[in-house]
Amino acid sequence: MKEELLKFKINATVLYDKANPLFRQQSLEEKHELITKYKLFDSEIKDGTETNLFTTKKKDIYTRNPNSPFLMITSTSFTPDEDINILLNALDSIDSKYEDAWPQIELLVTGKGPQKDIIEKRIKNKKYKKIRVQTIWLQIVDYPKMLGSLNRISRFRNLPSLFKLRS
């Protein structure tokens, strides 16, 4: 781009975007502790073993649960200009049309805002077969950690091509 701009006598400086070091893949231990902190994904402690849908901790040894669901995260301010209903409508389509093609999906919706109660009521009334939606407010330091806890992200790279969104 810099060379192209020079043709128009524009001297440009190239700036390279690099993610903050806080945004990194989390270890199994970090993922487990974060999920446990927020009591997400069926977290429980039984007979000295801590489990959730994604990880297990037994005697300070962390393991990945082999049939863990697909984790998705989105943030919203629960306002009309960030219409989370578009995503919920897409989940309706996935759950009804692609039930056999998808693993269990766990969706975390993070944020606060004026329409949060309305959206939570809509989510509560949903009867998905393979999808569970949870709303949560993450502490700012935990947001990059939760993003770093995503699993199987490359496996479903073309998610938007599976359904049509109408605006």
Image (spheres, rainbow, N blue to C red):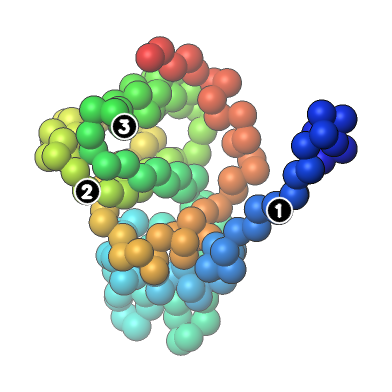
Reading the image, the residue beneath label 2 is: 112
Q: Residues within 10 Å of mark 1 (few under 14, many from 20)?
A: few
Percent coordinates x, y for residue 146 in the rendering:
44, 60
Q: Earlier in the sequence, mark 3 or mark 1?
A: 1
Work out how far the residue at label 3 is from the one at label 2, CA to CA, in angstroms. Answer: 12 Å
Percent coordinates x, y for residue 70 in the rendering:
49, 45
Q: Which amino acid does label 1 sit on?
A: Tyr
Disc 2 versus disc 1: nearer the observer: 1
Reading the image, the residue beneath label 3 is: 82
Q: What element carries label 3?
A: loop
Reading the image, the residue beneath label 1 is: 16
Can you say whether 109 is above or below 131 in the image? Answer: below
Q: Which of marks 3 and 2 is nearer the N terminus?
A: 3
Q: What element carries label 2?
A: loop
Residue drawn at point x = 60 percent, y = 59 percent: 19
Residue drawn at point x = 52 percent, y = 81 percent: 61
Disc 3 versus disc 1: nearer the observer: 1
Residue 132 in sight from this viewpoint: yes
Q: What element carries label 1?
A: loop
Quarter of the image for residue 10 reads top right
Q: Which of marks 2 and 1 is nearer the N terminus?
A: 1
**Tag 3–tag 1 contact (CB < 8 Å):** no
Can you say whether 116 is above or below 64 in the image? Answer: above
